[in-house]
Amino acid sequence: MTKYSNEFKSRAVKRYLNGGISLADVCQEFDIPSHRTLQEWVSHAQSHGLESLRVKHSRTNYPQEFKLAVVHYLHTHQTSRAQTAAHFGISSSQVNAWDRIVREQGVVGLRPKPKGRQPSDMAKHKTNKPIKPIKRLEPTQEEKYQQEILELKQKLHKAELDRDILKAYATLTKKPGQTSQHK
């Protein structure tokens, strides 16, 4: 069961979007403890319409390429997790989880996991075995390439930001009447 109904979210968002009232006032009026929650609802509604606020009762299995695109967008567009989530129409906690997985395990961690219990485990469920450590998945060649591409794109983005900062600094420190020697 979800904490807020679909109608409740829609009413709160509509109340804020009608104007003349702040996020804090709407939160107080609707007894929403955090303005960040309302801010996420508003962001989702503005990006994808009020229907995006509906609670999804089924699990969505996202392909590895989609997850990678979300993480790439997060790192190269200077957006927050909430803004990235609103852009893709998913929850910010999902964006956070995928970002953490890529940092800790690499692209291979985004691989779809098999669902359910293994058939051999069902017959042995009564025996008490020590818990085995999770074995590290070996990346495929394509996943290695995707990991390398993601890392290179992040490095390129960082280098572009550094370049822009240096250009702005050079412009700010340039004396009046001095011409640039490099073009």
Image (cartoon, rainbow, N blue to C red):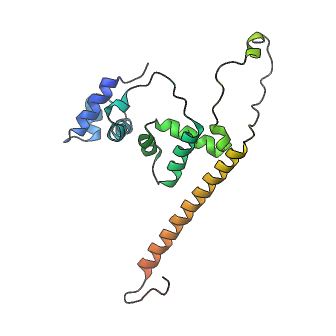
Which residue corresponds to the image point at 54% horizontal and 60% vertical from the top-left? Answer: 157
Q: State the image coordinates of residue 100 (x, y, percent, origin top left).
A: 60, 42
Which residue corresponds to the image point at 38% horizontal and 35% vertical from the top-left? Answer: 37
Q: Would residue 147 appear left or right of 18 to someone viewing this image?
A: right
Q: State the image coordinates of residue 48 (x, y, percent, origin top left).
A: 36, 38
Residue 153 found in image quarter = bottom right
View extreme (left): residue? 20
Q: Would residue 111 appear left or right of 174 to someone viewing this image?
A: right
Q: State the image coordinates of residue 45 (x, y, percent, origin top left).
A: 33, 37
Q: Nearer the viewer, residue 8 or 102?
A: 102
| Vertical arrangement, residue 90 with respect to residue 129, above or below | below
Which residue corresponds to the image point at 37% horizontal and 32% vertical from the top-left? Answer: 52
Q: Would residue 2 appear left or right of 22 to someone viewing this image?
A: right
Q: Nearer the viewer, residue 38 or 83?
A: 83
| Image quadrant where one finds the N terminus | top left
Q: State the image coordinates of residue 132 (x, y, percent, origin top left).
A: 78, 26
Please tell me how many numbered marks the rendered image carries: 0
Residue 178 found in image quarter = bottom left
View extreme (bottom): residue? 177
